[in-house]
Structure formats: structure tokens, C-alpha cells
């Protein structure tokens, strides 16, 4: 697995900023993943920026105002920015949507991250990042979340305050009205929580109210909070669920639990406390499946999968 967070994005842009010529008049971001790197590049290059749709309609972002009209004579050299290139289909669509402007502007294309072999699809890039990969800014909409486990408190919703955690009426009220945090746009494989089984109904009510789709909800089958505190096996409980199926990611809120889950499973854990990927302990089998070891085997397996899908 290859993972980049916002800090990594900022660092690689600063490290390799010199690859971008200084003659660009305008930075244009590809919605929505390209807007963050476009904003950073515009900041560091001290240039105005906008998104593709606004650019096509003659609008740019200016300090103190949004989407002001621009005079086409003001700009000649335009840099279009996306966060990454994998298959390259998105960049092909972008170029197609802008090709009618090639006579009016000198348009160049940039991606921060590209997979090896796709670098010629853009004029500028910053770093090679092979597949499989996750980015902090789009991980919650990733299509593979059905192969992931999610914690609830501190991930899907805020943690309860000490006064709310009474294992009684206040806690039930918290569960039913917990403020949402990171709500995924894709279906989750399994939600794994240290909440007690007796709060399943209230938890399911909150998940439904917040339109969170999932296949399974795993809770702690203990009688009360005192028993849970005595057991003190949160990491082990979550690790068992993570290992029970061929999941590829666990999203956990608490850093020390993230370390423990990774130690027990030897599979990656994304910690929302700092949005770092914890992958200190690695299993050979996981790295074989992900392509880190013997990558040609993964490429062959993906080709066979695509062939078999054609016969379905």
C-alpha cells in the first residue's frame, strides 16, 4: 500500500516546486481532487487560480471576492492541475473538454502523483506513486472501502464527553445524537466498535440517520462498561474482526489502538488522530497481494480478473 496525506502533498510540492516554469499566468484545478494541489501551487507561485468549470465560464478566484470575470487578454499560459494519474482516463476527459481553447491559451497539464509509465500523459509531475494507493483527501470516497473496517467513535462520530459516558441514559442520548465526523461516500465492509452489544439498536439508528452504508456491525458482547474496562481488549477485539476477512484497511481513531491493531494483524491502519498510515508490522501475504512483493504476480492476477469478468 502507498499512502499520501496532506502533509506529504505539501512537502512534495515544496521540494519539487522548481519543475514548474514561472511563466504561467493562471492555475486551474480539476474538481475535486485537483483543487487542493492547485490551491497550493497557486499560493507558492503567487498566481490566481480557479476550477475548470469556472475557467470555461470566464471566472477566476480573486482575493476578497469569488468567481470574478477575467479578461481573456490577461492570461496566456495556463497550468491545469490534478492530484494524480492512474489509468489516465480522467486526464483524457479534461484535455478533451479544453481542446477548443488551445488557440486562445497555451495550456499545459500537471499531476502531482503518477504511476510509473503514465508520466507522458502530463507535461509536469512531482512523484511516482504506484498502485495500490490511498490519498487522505479522497480516501473516504474510495471504491475499496467495502474491503475496510471502520471504528465509530472518533471516526464516524465524535467521542463522547466524560459526562456523557455514564453507561446509561446520557450515553444513550449521546449515541442517538452524536455529531458526525468523517462520513464515507462509499459502502463500508465492517464497522468494528468497542461499544457494548446492548447499544446495537441505538447505534444502528444513528448509522441509518447519517446514511452510512455497511455490511456488518461488530460490537463488544459484554454486560456493562465496568466489564469492558476490566477486559481492556479494544485492540484485540478490532484486530480479530480485521483478520476475519480479506480486509485491506482499518480506520481507527486512537493512535495507540492503531499501533496495536497493526501489530496484531500486520495490515495497515489509518489513524484519524493524525491521518498517518500505521504499517510498521507487515505480513508477507499482504504485501504479496498488494504488489509490494513480486509485483508481476499482482499484475497477472488483475489481468486474469479482468478477463474472467468479461465472461460474466
Image: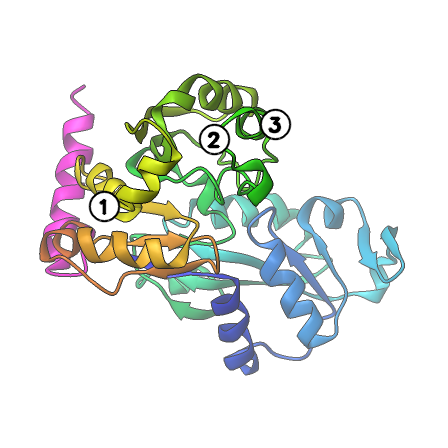
Residue 254 in sight: yes
Can you see residue 80?
A: no
- Up-down relation of residue 23 to residue 214 (above or below): below
Q: Is residue 177 left or right of residue 71?
A: left
Percent across and percent down for residue 266 are 19, 55
Q: CA distance from mark 3 to mark 2?
A: 15 Å
184 sits left or right of 291 in the view: right
Q: Quadrant of residue 215?
A: top left
| Secondary element at image label 3 | helix
Would you call the spot at circle 3 few (<14 residues within 10 Å), some (14-19), or many (20 or more)?
Answer: some
For label 1, the residue is: 236
Of callouts 1 and 3, the N-terminal one: 3
Front: mark 1 or 2: 2
Foreground residue among 94 and 214: 214
Residue at left offset 43%, top offset 45%: 89
Q: CA distance from mark 1 to mark 3?
A: 28 Å
Measured in 3D between alpha carbons, the distance from the residue under mark 1 to the one under mark 2, in whole angstroms, is 22 Å
Residue 296: in magenta span: yes
Q: Which residues are magenta?
A: 290-312
Residue found 59% across the figure and 40% down from its top: 163
Q: Which residue is mark 2?
A: 167
Circle 3 residue: 177
Q: Quadrant of the N terminus?
A: bottom left
Amino acid at each position: 500500500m502507498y499512502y499520501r496525506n496532506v502533509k506529504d502533498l505539501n512537502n512534495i510540492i515544496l521540494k519539487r516546486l522548481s519543475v514548474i516554469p514561472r511563466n504561467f499566468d493562471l492555475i486551474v484545478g480539476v474538481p475535486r481532487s485537483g483543487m487542493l494541489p492547485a490551491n497550493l501551487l497557486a499560493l507558492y507561485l503567487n498566481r490566481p487560480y480557479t476550477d475548470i468549470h469556472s475557467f470555461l465560464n470566464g471566472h477566476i478566484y480573486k482575493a476578497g471576492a469569488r468567481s470574478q470575470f477575467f479578461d481573456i487578454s490577461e492570461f496566456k499560459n495556463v497550468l491545469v492541475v490534478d492530484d494524480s494519474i492512474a489509468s489516465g482516463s480522467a486526464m483524457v476527459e479534461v484535455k478533451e473538454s479544453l481542446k477548443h481553447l488551445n488557440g486562445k491559451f497555451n495550456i499545459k497539464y500537471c499531476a502531482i502523483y503518477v504511476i510509473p509509465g503514465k508520466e507522458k500523459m502530463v507535461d509536469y509531475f512531482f512523484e511516482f506513486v504506484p498502485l495500490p494507493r490511498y490519498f487522505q483527501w479522497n480516501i473516504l470516497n474510495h471504491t475499496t472501502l467495502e474491503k475496510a473496517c471502520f471504528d465509530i467513535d472518533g471516526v464516524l462520530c465524535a467521542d463522547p464527553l466524560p459526562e456523557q459516558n455514564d453507561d446509561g441514559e446520557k450515553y444513550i442520548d449521546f449515541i442517538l445524537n452524536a455529531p458526525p465526523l468523517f462520513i464515507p461516500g462509499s459502502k463500508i465492509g465492517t464497522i468494528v466498535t468497542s461499544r457494548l452489544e446492548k447499544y446495537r439498536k441505538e447505534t444502528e439508528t444513528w448509522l441509518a440517520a447519517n446514511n452510512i452504508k455497511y455490511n456488518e456491525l461488530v460490537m463488544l458482547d459484554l454486560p456493562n462498561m465496568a466489564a469492558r474496562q476490566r477486559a481492556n481488549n479494544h485492540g484485540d477485539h478490532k484486530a480479530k474482526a480485521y483478520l476475519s476477512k480479506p480486509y485491506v484497511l482499518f480506520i481507527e481513531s486512537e493512535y495507540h489502538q492503531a499501533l496495536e491493531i497493526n501489530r496484531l494483524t500486520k495490515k495497515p491502519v489509518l489513524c484519524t488522530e493524525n491521518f498517518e498510515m500505521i504499517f510498521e508490522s507487515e505480513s508477507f501475504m499482504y504485501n504479496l497481494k498488494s504488489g509490494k512483493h513480486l509485483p508481476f504476480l499482482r499484475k497477472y492476477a488483475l489481468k486474469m480478473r479482468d478477463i474472467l469478468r468479461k465472461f460474466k
